[in-house]
Image (cartoon, rainbow, N blue to C red):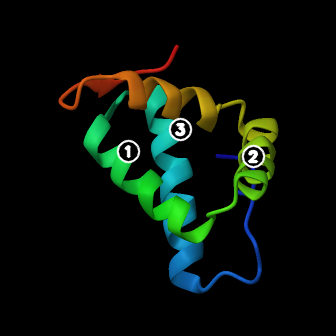
């Protein structure tokens, strides 16, 4: 990783760690594949921290610009997948 994750300085340390964890799982979905349940749990926590759609889009766009990984496409695939399925992005 040679980039910085998008963070909001109003978040607590725990919230920042949880958001970064979500983005790390998105990266893992592209690089190795990830268990759908683990990804969905991290996304639910992410949505507790970033409940607004506009803010989510902004943060995820910033992440995609620096990393090349799309949180939106990853979550779309995860939501459409079977519950036991492994998510692997291409």
Secondary structure of the residue carrying numbered label 2: helix
Residue pictured at 46% horizontal, 52% vertical:
43
Q: Nearer the viewer, mark 1 or mark 3?
A: 1
Left or right relative to 52: residue 79 = left
Asked whether the beta carbons under mark 3 and mark 2 sit within 8 Å of each other, the answer is no
Q: Position of residue 52 (x, y in %)?
A: 69, 60
Q: Position of residue 40 (x, y in %)?
A: 37, 46
Residue pictured at 44% horizontal, 31% vertical:
29
Which residue matches tag 2?
57
Q: CA distance from mark 3 to mark 2?
A: 17 Å
Q: CA distance from mark 1 to mark 3?
A: 11 Å
Q: Which mark is residue 63?
A: none
Q: CA distance from mark 1 to mark 2?
A: 18 Å
Which residue matches tag 3?
27
Farthest top residue in view: 90
Q: Nearer the viewer, mark 3 or mark 2?
A: 2
User: Does 8 sit above or below residue 54?
Assistant: below
Secondary structure of the residue carrying numbered label 3: helix
Residue pictured at 73% horizontal, 45% vertical:
63
Left or right relative to 42: residue 71 = right
Left or right relative to 88: residue 65 = right
Residue pictured at 64% horizontal, 46% vertical:
1
Q: Nearer the viewer, mark 1 or mark 2?
A: 2
Label 1 or label 3, whichever comes before in sequence order: 3
Q: Position of residue 83 (x, y in %)?
A: 22, 31
Q: Which mark is residue 39?
A: 1
Q: Residues within 10 Å of mark 2 (few under 14, many from 20)?
A: some
């Amino acid at each position: 990783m040679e980039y910085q994750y998008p963070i909001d300085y109003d978040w607590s340390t725990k919230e920042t760690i949880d958001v970064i964890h979500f983005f790390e799982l998105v990266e893992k979905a592209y690089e190795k594949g990830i268990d759908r349940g683990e990804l969905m749990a991290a996304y639910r926590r992410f949505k507790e921290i970033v409940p607004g759609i506009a803010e989510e889009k902004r943060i995820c766009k910033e992440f995609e610009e620096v990393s090349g990984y799309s949180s939106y496409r990853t979550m779309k695939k995860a939501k459409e997948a079977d519950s036991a399925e492994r998510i692997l992005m291409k």
